[in-house]
Amino acid sequence: MDHKDILTRFKNGDLGREQAAALLTGAHPGSAARHAPLTTAAAPPRAAVSQPPPARALTTAPAGGGPPLPADGYAITALHGRFSDADGLDAFWRTAVLGGRDAGRRTSGSPAGAGAGAGAGAGAGDFDAVFFGLTPQDAALMDPQERLLLEVLWQTLETAGCTGARLDTLTAADGEPRAVGVYVAHDPVGRAAVAQAPAGDAPAAAGAGVTLPARLSTLLDLRGPGHCAGGGGAAFLVALHQALSALRAGECGAALVGAVGLRPGPARRHPRGGGGGQGVGAVLLRPLAAALAAGDTVHAVVRATAVAHPGRRAREAAADRLARRALAAAGVTAAGVGLRETETTVAATTGDTGAATGLAALVRAVLQLRHGTLLPAPGDSSAAPWARPHDQSGRELPRRATVAVRPTAGSPAAHVLLEEPPRHGPEPITAGPAAASGELVLLSAPTPEHLAATARRLADRVLPADAVEHGTQDGRRLLAALARELRLGRAVRDCRLAVVARDTGELGAALRAFAEDQAGADDQDAAGDRDGAGDRDGAGDRDGAGGRDGAGDGDGAGDQDRAGAGGARGSVRCADLRGAQGPGVLFGELPETRAYLAALWRGRRLDALARLWLAGVDVSAADTAGAAPVLALPTSALLRRPLREAGCPATDGPTPS
């Protein structure tokens, strides 16, 4: 390179200041100049490499080795998935650890709800249209893969605590809130949607595969970029590669990457990939520094990705080339990688999952990093501990894994380098001590049935009646963290619940009593004919809350005690605002409103806040608790119902999920 080339590359950000200076002064190759990328215009075409650099400038390590250049990475802050024989990641891990020996134990959690031997899409007509604000007719027109992706993308956001107030903090470079990109991969979209679509909507239905990111972003009110990577085994990894490019460019503050694959044939495992399989899942990506600052859970770090078509070259040669590029981009040698997941290793667990193959491989790798355990290789019988590597000086290094899918006819190859998250000491479960006066717990859902099912799920999974933490300081800290997480991490819906509790035992009892009472009411009333659950619980005093500006300090004596013991503090108050008219008691967009609500939070006017919440005010938006570690909670309950032909909604009872 001449001086002009060096200065041009320095100006474009391809060379650092020290690297450019070393090249201009003719420093020894062993100095910083040796670390500069030395490709020239005559070099062969490079694979597209996504390496997580500081300050969004793309840098790569020298192909010849040497110390790695500074790298930050991108955090996987949430992952969610369902596969053949596994209705969640815990079940998926157990299946993988057993090495396929539980193949006969099919659960109801197959992505399509299929039974043993069922074909692609069998049972995929079960869907909770109400939860996502859709009519049964609209839901029936959606392709089954779109419905599955919609569910799993939402659940991934909820797992990350990013469907409520936190979602507004995910901003693009221009400050736009809710800037979350949507990148998806799927098998070919069926023609059922086209056949059922009205004449004017047929073209849109026919192009559903291409428009999936836009449709999903609209339904979830996400304002980032999006792209559909199509199908093929590497499609999910290609979508992930594209998402990193958008994050690097500042087009979004986070990115959802999802995939769904429904392959025909029996869902069985085979060491060489035989048999159909089903899989659907997603991950949420954020810059690592931002994730750590926000207190997000980091499941793994994406250090580099590489994607390319093989052209006329041998597929194995193309895959090897991508591996070298990804390692060079992260400044890592092959010796520093302790695990390689491919389409072959995945097939032993899930069968052939089509467009979800890369997703299944990445999930396997992340879970092995999390558990520090290497899963049985095809043909092996047991898992093994995964010891951390050390460098020549004895310094402990992070575990690393690669996820690679070789190219197939018409599809590219892809390679991803993962690293376990930074190690740090245990963090407190809450940023501050629990208040002796109790905590205000707010919950909401689209219908009273959803609200009761979510309350029951929360009580059973987080607040079991026999938990030893009840009444202890740890229990009160858990209560404070749970209350804050529900306020900041969950979307605000029309059917609402409020309860002030002093410890986890009191809260669990209140939520269980509310769910049982709601179930009894459902037995007596026709579904959907009630004026609102709140009419029985003091929701009728919504007008009173508005007349007093929500500043009353009463103890909620006008509300029925749902919890039995515990008095007013343990009582659950709820309201159904689906038929509410008018602007409400407060204008939430006014700065004065936000200041007023913030003052109520600082003064711990919990009853006033509860009354405003039940009157339709989003009191969580003004919560001044600040950033705190995300607390993992069960996702909201989905009440799936069978979907019949468009225009003929089913009356079957819901299946909680």
Image: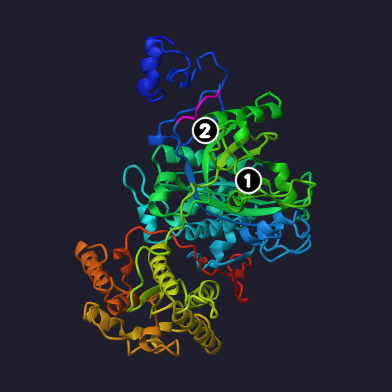
| In this picture, residue 360 sits left or right of residue 513 | right
Q: Position of residue 551 (x, y in %)?
A: 22, 78
Q: Which residue is mark 2?
A: 330
Q: Earlier in the sequence, mark 1 or mark 2?
A: 2
| In this picture, residue 80 sits left or right of residue 384 | left
Q: Indicate whether 640 appears above or below 552.
A: above
- Which residue lies at the image location 46% right of the left edge and 30% below the top edge? 69
Q: Position of residue 573 (x, y in %)?
A: 39, 82
| Residue 55 within the segment the image draws in magenta | no
- Which residue lies at the image location 55% right of the left edge and 47% below the top edge? 184
| Residue 66 within the segment the image draws in magenta | yes
Q: Which mark is residue 387?
A: 1
In the rendered image, is residue 351 in sight? no
Q: Quadrant of the N terminus?
A: top left
What amino acid is at disc 1? Answer: Ala
Mark 1 against mark 2, which lies toward the viewer? 1
Q: CA distance from mark 1 to mark 2?
A: 21 Å
Q: Which mark is residue 93?
A: none
User: Taken as a whole, is the magenta stretch helix, strand or loop?
Assistant: loop
Query: What residue span does the magenta drawing correspond to?
Result: 65-69
What amino acid is at disc 2? Answer: Ala
Q: How busy is the neighbourhood of tag 2: few (under 14 within 10 Å), some, or many (20 plus)?
A: many
In the image shown, does 194 or 532 lie closer to the viewer? Answer: 532
Q: Position of residue 185 (x, y in %)?
A: 59, 46
In the image shown, does 356 or 347 lie closer to the viewer? Answer: 347
In the rendered image, is residue 231 in sight? yes
Q: How busy is the neighbourhood of tag 1: few (under 14 within 10 Å), some, or many (20 plus)?
A: few
Q: Quadrant of the C terminus?
A: bottom right
Q: Secondary structure at mark 2?
A: helix
User: Which residue is outermost to the front?
Assistant: 393
The quadrant in which residue 114 appears is: bottom right
